[in-house]
Amino acid sequence: MKTFFKAIGVASVLAVGALSVSALSASAQVTLKLAHAAPASDLQQTLSLFFKEQVEARSNGSLKVNVFPQGQLGNDAQMIDGTRSGIIDIEMSGLNNFTGLIPEAAAFTLPFMFPTREIAYKVLDGDVGQGVSKQMEEFGLKGLGYPENGYRNVSNNRGPIRVPEDLKGLRMRVNSSKALNDMFDMVGANPQQIPVAELYTALETGVVDAQDHPIGVVQSFKFYEVQKYLSLTRHAYSPLALVMNLNKFNGLSAEEQKIITEVSAEAVAMQRELSIAKEDEMIATLEAEGMMVNRDVDGAAFQKAVKPVWRNFIKENGDTLINAILEAGM
């Protein structure tokens, strides 16, 4: 009988021990919420799913990533605030949305700042871009990289945009970039700030009759259903920023931090490559959907018309970052 109770006792200890190990394993897993505003068909979601898959695999399950696309956790401003406060762990949105925190970062989104993607990548991934990432830490954010939206182009329902005068009088949806607001105001359009999640309805109902976005966004948000003309103005390069709550990042183990940073870099590189590779295909798809795509744009006329935007930026923010960007891009 004593042997029986002794065996029961050992079994109980083993069972409790097994439960404790299981509980420890469960508590050791860190779940990260990653949010962005783009539809599930967008390359932002492709990047997010790659990030999720690779982080979970390389961490052997100690890190889990849940992805929330299409503004499920709020608009751009709300996602940035949520990430700063720790409600969201990682978010991705246009770099222009961070200029309220770091005003001089608007230099990256000035019209015609980056003549090629290669120069944009060189600057963003180099000391200049990393300097801005470092500044984000002052606001509780860890910069993980700069994916891309691509070059911004104009769509509208009135006609092709060939020269700046063609924009005159258009009710133009713009993002939070002061530089782009100034640009469209200078050429005679009527800029209005509207969250991207509300833009389709605004175009459909005629609240605005024009907008500017990279090709991928025009396709993924299905703006071709409510816009007739797309003109390849390529008037500004549009970088995204992938950021993480700084305290959450610092709370991870050194190995987990390494996984996050390495996977982020790989995800950004992958998304950029896809953005380039798929652009012509996406333009062809937009044409097949009925959009009239205009490639006859007088880029020199646009560059001349928007020079005052640069002067205004320098007056307000100085020319230090602009000069650093131009020098780094050489």
Image (spheres, rainbow, N blue to C red):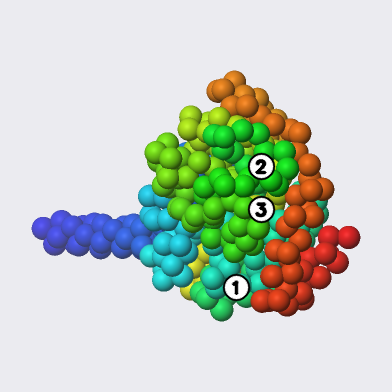
Which of the numbered marks, if any, corresponds to residue 309? none
Q: Is residue 250 left or right of residue 163?
A: left
Q: Position of residue 170 (x, y in %)?
A: 56, 45
Q: Nearer the viewer, mark 1 or mark 3?
A: 3
Q: Amino acid at mark 3?
A: Val
Instruction: Between residue 93 and residue 35, name the one nearer to us.
Output: 93
Q: Amino acid at mark 2?
A: Asp
Q: Which residue is mark 2?
A: 166
Residue 66 vertical position relative to residue 46 in the rendered view, above or below: below
* Residue located at (48% from left, 32% from top): 226
Q: Position of residue 89 (x, y in %)?
A: 45, 62
Q: Position of residue 172 (x, y in %)?
A: 54, 48
Residue 97 shows up from this direction: yes
Residue at the far left: name it.
1
Residue at the far right: name it.
330
Disc 2 versus disc 3: distance between alpha carbons? 9 Å
Q: Which residue is mark 3?
A: 187
Point out the tag, 1 or 3, that comes first from the N-terminus: 1
Disc 1 versus disc 2: distance between alpha carbons? 33 Å
Q: Which residue is mark 1?
A: 102
* Residue located at (65% from left, 34% from top): 160
Judged from the image, the secondary structure of the residue bearing numbered disc 3 is: loop
* Residue located at (78% from left, 42% from top): 298
